[in-house]
Every structure is written in C-alpha cells, then in structure tokens.
Image: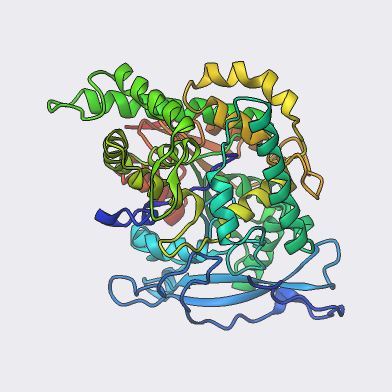
C-alpha cells in the first residue's frame, strides 16, 4: 500500500457501505498549433467512465448550477511539445457570485496519486460553496488517470486475484509468490500502457496544470491540493514560482522523504489512527463492542489478522476476506473519523465470521465497484509512484527493514514494508529520491497539517514549509483526526483557508485550530 489512494466519503455509500480505453488523443504526426491558445468546449458532463469508477453523471449543485466538462489537449511528451497529444479531462462549476467579484479558476487535485478529480469534485462541490462565490471550481483527471489517457494493467478478474494475494509473506514460498505476482502486474502495465508509462510523472502533471492555467485565462494558478495534491502543488511551485497565485496545501506529503521513509511514516500514521480509534471506542459510556480496553482492541485485531492469514472468512459472493483485504479495509476506515463506526461494524461482523463489511471497505480503497468493475486508480497510483520514485528495493532489503517497520506499527508494519517491492521490476526508471519543491519567489502557500492524519503524518507539513523556502510556506495546525483538515468542517480551519483564497489574507504562521 505505497501512498494509499485518498478515497473520500463517497467511497462509502450510507447504510450499505457501497464501498480500456486506448491512449486518447495521440496521433503520429507533429502538430504546430500553440496549445496555450486552444479553446475549451464546455458541455454537459457524461456519466463517469469505467476508468473513473462508473456511476451517474454529476447532479446539479444546490441552487441548480450545472457541472460542465471539457477536454484539454496536452503533449504526450513535454520534451517534444509539438509531438503526440493526449486528452486531459476537465470539470467545472462556474462562480456563483457577481461577475465583477470573480477571481478566476480554483483548480483542485484530491490526491492518490490516481484519483479522478472529475468524479471527486462534484461529490464534494457543496463543501466549497463559499469558495465558488468568487471562483470557478475546476478539477481534472491527471494524465494516466480516469478519462485522461488512462494507464491500464490487469483486467477485473486478474485484479480480484491480485488484491486477494498474501501481501505479508511469512516464508520463502509466499515471498516468491508475492514477487512473481508483482512482476506480472508490472509486466501487464508495460504491455498495455507502454506509451504512457514514461510520461505520468508529477512533473508532467505540473506542466499540464500550467497549460490549464493559460487556457482557463488566468495569469496565476489558484490551487487547492489535498494529500498527493500537495506534492503536485509543490512541484508546480518549484517549476513555475512566478505563476503561483493563492494556493492551499491540505494533508501534506513530506517532500523530503524517500519512498522507504514515506512508507515507514505511513505505518506510524495508521498505527496512531488505530490507537486513537481504540481509545475513542473504549472511552465512551457505552460498552465498546470490539474490546474492553484500547489494548484489548489492538490485541483482538491482531488475532483476527493472524487467523485470516491461515483461514480467510466468507466475504462477498465467491470472494473471501483475506488478511491482506482486512488490513486494507481497516486502513481505509482510518482515513476519516466519520468511518470509525463502519470499522466497528466490520470488526464486529468479522469476529462473528462475516467478512463482508471489511471487504467492502477494502474494495473502496482499491476502486472496485459493486458490479465487480475496477477504476484505474490502482494502476495509475502505482504507475505515477514508480515513475516518480528512484529507489528500487529487493526482498532482502525489505526483510532487513522489517524490525523497524514492526516497531513503527505491529499491525501495519509488514504491510507497509512489503509494499516497497512494488516498483522493483518497473519498466521505467524513477525520476528522483524525492520531489524538489523549493519555490523561491512564489506567492505565499498556506500549508495545513492535521495532528491525527494517518496517511500524510503531521510532521510533513513542517517539512513542506521548510522545503518551499523562506517566505513561501505558511503553516497552520489542526488538532484533529482523519486525513485532511478542511473537510473536517472545523470552522477555524475553514475560516483561515477561505479567508486566504477569497481575500488574500494570510493567517499568522503557526496558527493552531482545534
């Protein structure tokens, strides 16, 4: 689970917990037109594609505002800007305020990497109603994602088997199977998406955003990046510091870490979130149904996972809940405090021999719909991470690192450690040990860290501020739970973010919200 996809609340549908395409737009001839002068044709949005996760076309916003979609032409290879082209899918809701008060377009990236902004923004558009008074709300499927020249690897039945595998091998045979499966996944990506794999780096997506800025008609990029979106925003600020307008980074990736350090940090982060869940459950006046004390909760979960390693539980249809799927489902539920009730329900059921809820949670993390179709979030997540991250780890190296990972998290340590072999046999070399986000000359960037964040631990916010450079990053701390801060609906956080984006007022550095 390297950099697990950031899946938002729509991945869990109320009481039920409802938890390809060819390379679009590529031609063989060089093209001479100036892409920054292209005109976007905004139309009613279609239903999401299979790669975007399927479902219905976006519903109008409160008040009746319609979502509009368009396609941006971008170079396949930014080193050859007049060569082959790809399509980048965009979505927008026009500003609701008076025309004279409109600032421009506010571009969102919700993370992953691999998440579809075209499907995520409408799901949460009402949360940004105040920002829409002065901005067109805009998001996009980054290259390799969803409707934007999506990377393809395994088919649906193959993905079912891939996600059922034992991701925490206990012996040589299990280790060999894991490595073979990883090699087969990576080979399928190369076979099905060879043309795209060298061109899905974060630097490529950042250049797409600058083209987007120009075509949208803005002198500066106004930006709201969440999770991996903060890394993308930092890389953009490094490449185009003079083009940065008002920008907010929320749920901040530590840009100074290697992929190993990032995985270790996530092991610690998810363990912290699990500890907080256990303390919360056992501190209530009513009995906690999954343990008598916080330690009892942890012990029972550890026993469940150990039992599942030997004897999976009935899951959904013919699929069974494996140790890997259960761990994945638990991690998914820790992304938001709003999901803790689902984690309690899933654990209760699993203790009674029913793995359905934990499997639904795991499916939502992996982008599997109820009808058995997968979005391309897993393929895109791995493709982007492996194109970005230079280190390649062997099984022997992982085994030497296991004690440190287990010390960071008895429950998630092995899972995170073995995820480091994901890129070992990748067809494209990784770009760097970590991204360069130094952005001397940029406008101020508001950097918001959550002390209880499992996926992007709080310390990353301070590291991002330091890496952006003096006078650029402005740190704000939220003492809360879950992945991200703005969508917690904490008024202090929202007032600070809205104040900066709408009026340009930068909060005092070191502001703390609780």
Residue 16's place in the image compared with 140, above or below, is above
Q: In which quarter of the image is residue 420?
A: top right
The quarter of the picture where the C terminus appears is top left
Q: Which residue is drawn at 49% across and 56% down?
A: 367
Q: Which colour scheme is used?
A: rainbow
- Residue 257 seen from this side: no
Q: Which residue is drawn at 69% across and 80% down?
A: 38
- Residue 299 seen from this side: yes
- Judge by depth and name the residue closer to the eye, 240 or 273: 273
The quarter of the picture where the N terminus appears is top right
Image mark count:
0
- Position of 85 with respect to 256 (left or right) is right
Q: Position of residue 81 (x, y in %)?
A: 82, 68
Q: Where is residue 125 in the image (x, y as percent from the top left)?
A: 38, 63
Considering every residue shown, the one lying at the far left of the view is: 285
Q: Position of residue 430 (x, y in %)?
A: 78, 43
Q: Position of residue 493 (x, y in %)?
A: 37, 42
- Position of 336 with respect to 83 (left or right) is left
- Position of 21 with respect to 275 (left or right) is right
- Judge by depth and name the residue closer to the eye, 462 or 75: 75
Q: Residue at x 52, y 72 (%)?
A: 49
- Judge by depth and name the residue closer to the eye, 160 or 293: 160
């Amino acid at each position: 689970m390297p950099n697990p996809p950031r899946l938002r609340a729509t991945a869990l549908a109320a009481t039920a917990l409802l938890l390809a395409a060819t390379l679009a737009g590529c031609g063989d001839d060089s093209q001479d037109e100036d892409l920054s002068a292209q005109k976007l044709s905004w139309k009613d949005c279609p239903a999401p594609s299979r790669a975007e996760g399927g479902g219905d076309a976006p519903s109008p916003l409160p008040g009746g505002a319609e979502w509009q979609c368009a396609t941006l032409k971008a170079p396949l290879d930014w080193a050859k800007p007049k060569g082959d082209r790809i399509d980048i899918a965009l979505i927008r809701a026009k500003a609701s305020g008076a025309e004279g008060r409109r600032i421009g377009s506010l571009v969102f990236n919700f993370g992953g990497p691999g998440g579809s902004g075209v499907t995520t923004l409408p799901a949460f558009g009402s949360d940004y109603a105040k920002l829409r008074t002065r901005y067109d709300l805009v998001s996009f499927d980054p290259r390799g994602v969803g409707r934007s020249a999506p990377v393809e690897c395994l088919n649906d039945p193959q993905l079912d088997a891939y996600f059922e595998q034992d991701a925490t091998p206990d012996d040589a045979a299990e280790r060999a199977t894991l490595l073979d499966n990883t090699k087969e996944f990576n080979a399928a990506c190369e076979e099905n998406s060879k043309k795209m794999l060298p061109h899905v780096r974060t630097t490529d997506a950042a250049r797409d955003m600058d083209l987007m800025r120009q075509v949208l008609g803005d002198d500066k990029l106004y930006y709201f990046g969440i999770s991996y979106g903060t890394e993308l925003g930092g890389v953009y600020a490094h490449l185009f510091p003079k083009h940065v307008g008002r920008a907010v980074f929320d749920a901040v990736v530590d840009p100074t870490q290697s992929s190993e350090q990032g995985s270790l940090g996530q092991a610690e982060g998810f363990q912290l979130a699990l500890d907080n869940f256990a303390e919360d459950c056992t501190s209530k006046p009513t009995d906690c149904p999954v343990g008598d004390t916080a330690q009892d909760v942890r012990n029972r979960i550890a026993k469940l996972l150990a039992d599942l390693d030997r004897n999976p539980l009935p899951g959904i249809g013919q699929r069974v809940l494996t140790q890997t799927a259960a761990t994945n489902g638990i991690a998914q539920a820790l992304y938001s405090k709003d999901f803790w009730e689902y984690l309690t329900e899933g654990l209760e059921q699993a203790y009674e021999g029913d793995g359905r809820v934990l499997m639904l949670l795991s499916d939502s993390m992996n982008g599997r719909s109820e009808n058995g179709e997968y979005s391309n979030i897993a393929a895109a997540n791995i493709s982007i991470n492996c194109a970005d991250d230079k280190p390649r780890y062997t099984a022997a190296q992982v085994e030497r690192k296991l004690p440190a990972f287990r010390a960071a998290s008895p429950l998630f340590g092995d899972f995170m450690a073995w995820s480091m072999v994901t890129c070992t046999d990748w067809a494209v070399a990784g770009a760097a040990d970590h991204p360069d986000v130094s952005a001397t000359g940029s406008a101020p960037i508001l950097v918001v860290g959550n002390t209880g964040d499992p996926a992007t631990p709080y310390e990353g916010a301070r590291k991002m501020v330091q890496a952006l450079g003096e006078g650029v990053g402005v740190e704000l701390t939220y003492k809360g739970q879950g992945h991200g801060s703005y969508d917690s609906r904490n008024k202090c956080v929202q007032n600070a973010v809205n104040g900066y984006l709408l009026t340009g007022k930068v909060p005092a550095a070191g502001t703390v919200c609780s």
